[in-house]
Image: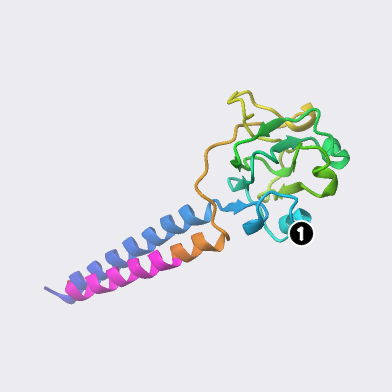
């Protein structure tokens, strides 16, 4: 065989490897899973600072937040901005109470959550999760959780306009979104190694 055929095979193998890397990166970077409060979870014990926790993260469309808590003492309520500021749990947009609740952030803007148990919000068990716009303007932000009752009725915060959707089941949380990117790196190295080994066998 001539050198031209071998060079063509090398180019083809490299193109396949590059395409595989792009597909893998798109799949792992598309969404992250965050446990609210990290290892502390959703609680009032130890006075966790959920404002600081949320500020330390960069949330994107499609990310999932997981609320882990003792369901005998806590719950999770999605509320309007006004109800969040006033710690008013009387008119929640949605409520979860399983102790391990996943909420997919499928709208840009602010997502307001609080614990509806008496006085918990007032002592800090609330979180404002802001999903950054992806470089284009959008309608008013909306919430997308499905109520605990299992109803699929779409809701928007404060009854305002904007798009709305539903919460979806999510994978178990990674303590850190970087875990997904570490997996990507390991897979990328493996793919490139296999591609390089394959080239030597040709």
Q: Looking at the rendering, which quadrant does residue 122 occupy?
A: top right
Residue 189, magenta (yes or no): yes
Residue reaching furthest to the left: 1
Residue highlighted by disc 1: 52
**Residue 186 or residue 121, whichever sits in front:** 121
- Pick the residue in front: 96 or 141: 96
Image spot of residue 73 (x, y percent): 70, 41
Whether the magenta-drawn stretch holds residue 193 is answered as yes
Q: Residue furthest front?
A: 72
- What residue do we see at 76% from left, 32% from top? 157
Q: Residue at x 77, y 47 (%)?
A: 125
- Image coordinates for residue 156, horizontal then vertical, percent: 72, 30
Q: Is residue 99 visible?
A: yes
Q: Is residue 11 above or below residue 102?
A: below
Front residue (pair 182, 41):
41
The N terminus - image quarter:
bottom left
Residue 139 appearing in the image: no
Point out residue 113 in the picture as x, y percentages from the top left corner.
Answer: 74, 41
Under circle 1, the secondary element is: helix
Q: Residue at x 60, y 23 (%)?
A: 151
Q: Is the residue 56 above or below the residue 35 in the image?
A: below
């Amino acid at each position: 065989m001539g050198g031209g055929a071998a060079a063509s095979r090398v180019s083809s193998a490299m193109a396949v490897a590059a395409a595989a890397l792009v597909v893998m990166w798109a799949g792992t970077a598309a969404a992250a899973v965050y446990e609210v409060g990290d290892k502390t979870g959703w609680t009032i014990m130890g006075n966790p600072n959920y404002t600081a926790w949320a500020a330390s993260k960069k949330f994107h469309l499609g990310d999932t937040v997981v609320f882990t808590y003792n369901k005998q003492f806590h719950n999770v309520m999605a509320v309007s901005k006004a109800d969040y500021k006033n710690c008013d749990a009387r008119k929640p947009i949605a409520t979860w109470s399983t102790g391990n609740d996943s909420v997919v952030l499928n709208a840009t803007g602010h997502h307001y959550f609080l614990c509806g148990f008496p006085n918990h919000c007032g002592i800090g068990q609330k979180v404002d999760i802001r999903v950054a716009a992806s470089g284009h303007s959008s309608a008013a932000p909306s919430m997308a959780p499905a109520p605990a009752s299992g109803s699929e009725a779409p809701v928007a915060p404060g009854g305002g306009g904007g798009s709305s959707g539903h919460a979806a089941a999510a994978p178990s949380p990674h303590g850190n979104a970087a875990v997904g990117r570490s997996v990507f790196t390991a897979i990328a190295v493996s793919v490139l190694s296999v591609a390089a080994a394959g080239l030597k066998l040709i």
